[in-house]
Amino acid sequence: MRPPSVVVLTAGLAGLATGQSVNPATGFVGKGITMFRPTCASACRDSLSTYRLNCSTVIHDMQGSATRHDTSSRTPSANKRALNNGSVMFVTSPSCYATDTAYLQSVAYCINTRCPLDDSITRAVLEDCWYTYLVGRDAAQPEPAVSYSGALSHTAADSQWSVIGEDDILDRTTLSTDDVYLAKYNAEHYFELSEERHVDFGLVLFIAGLPIANVFLMPTRGQAIFILYLFALNTVLCAVGYTTTPRSDASSTTTSNNNAWFPTPSTELLSYIANRTGILCFANMPLIIIYMTGQAAQSSLSDRHTPSSEPPRVGCRPVPSLRKWCLGSWH
């Protein structure tokens, strides 16, 4: 009799998916779930949503230093920003984003300027991104008052010459500066690329570590080789396949990074390494459960199918580091 490996495999993959799912969707990042794609449109939204809108709620704060916007933060502050013309903080609600004409037209203008239409970025893809992520990423949020095409059609002709300043109020159709947009784009593009690779390596580790029934009936030496194999696989998958933001000529030093979330290349790489090891932990977790519960499942089924006149079957020999290698002896 074979073990319920399909159930265990499904549970393991579900656990890995739970660790990676950032949106209310089914699957993995890069395999059913997207974080920021199309990245050009997401970067437009995130580079303009930090500005104060006409409908933003202003909060006066006497502690001016406490309201400064931390531009080095990995998590973008999508609805709060401090202005230099006084100790002012503001909050922008989802309904404000959904109805503010200047914001809608500015994002549409940015998308039209920054996103070249091709086979992967069609008008339908941009319209879907517009309704899904323009206001925010919450499950329940208002839809934009107009469509992407509708907002773009009302863009003023002289908008191509308008670029918003660092502390301006977004009250007209405008673009963010190239530096702000590029920093957002790099942060989101390379972060999502790294997350997709983490998922790929996690699946490699999980599938490669699955025991197969009636296979790997190894002696003690063979079990030791298998332990070394899993150790080497974890080490290699933790050490390779990282892609970080390339430094431009203007920021060729090792202490600067053209990335909105990570101020230096070293902090970006360390964050990706931490995320990779976390995903590999999710991949290892169901394997550990399989190794630990295999002996109990085998004993239960063996007792059920063994006549009372026969002595109980002897389980697998223990493997110190993997607890027990039992699934290979199912009959």
Image (cartoon, rainbow, N blue to C red):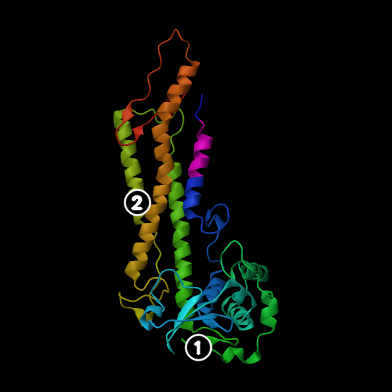
> Which of the two labelled residues, at mark 2 and mark 1, occupies the earlier sequence position?
1
Is residue 148 magenta-colored?
no
How far across and down, in percent of the image, does residue 265 sit?
Answer: 34, 70
Closest to the observer, 74 or 35: 74
Q: Residues within 10 Å of mark 2 (few under 14, many from 20)?
A: few
How far across and down, in percent of the image, does residue 136 sit?
Answer: 57, 69
Q: Is residue 123 above or below residue 236?
A: below
Q: Which residues are magenta?
A: 4-13
Which residue bears the numbered disc 2? 236
Asked if residue 116 shows in the view, the reply is no
Is residue 227 found left or right of 67 in the rendered image?
Answer: left
Q: Is residue 275 above or below residue 95?
A: above
Residue most toward the top?
Answer: 309
- Which image quadrant for residue 266? bottom left
Asked if residue 44 shows in the view, the reply is yes
Q: Could you tell me if the residues under marks 2 and 1 are in contact, i.e. CB atoms within 8 Å?
A: no
Q: Is residue 249 above or below residue 206?
A: below
**Amino acid of disc 2:** Val
How far across and down, in percent of the image, does residue 65 sit?
Answer: 36, 81
Is residue 6 magenta-colored?
yes
Distance (Cα) linking label 2 and label 1: 48 Å
- Residue at the (46%, 59%) spot, across then down: 195
Query: Magenta stretch mostly in which secondary structure?
Result: helix
As helix, strand or loop, the secondary structure at mark 2 comes to helix
Which residue bears the numbered disc 1? 168
Closest to the observer, 170 or 21: 170
Of labels 2 and 1, the one closer to you: 1
- Residue at the (44%, 47%) spot, across then down: 204
**Amino acid of disc 1:** Asp
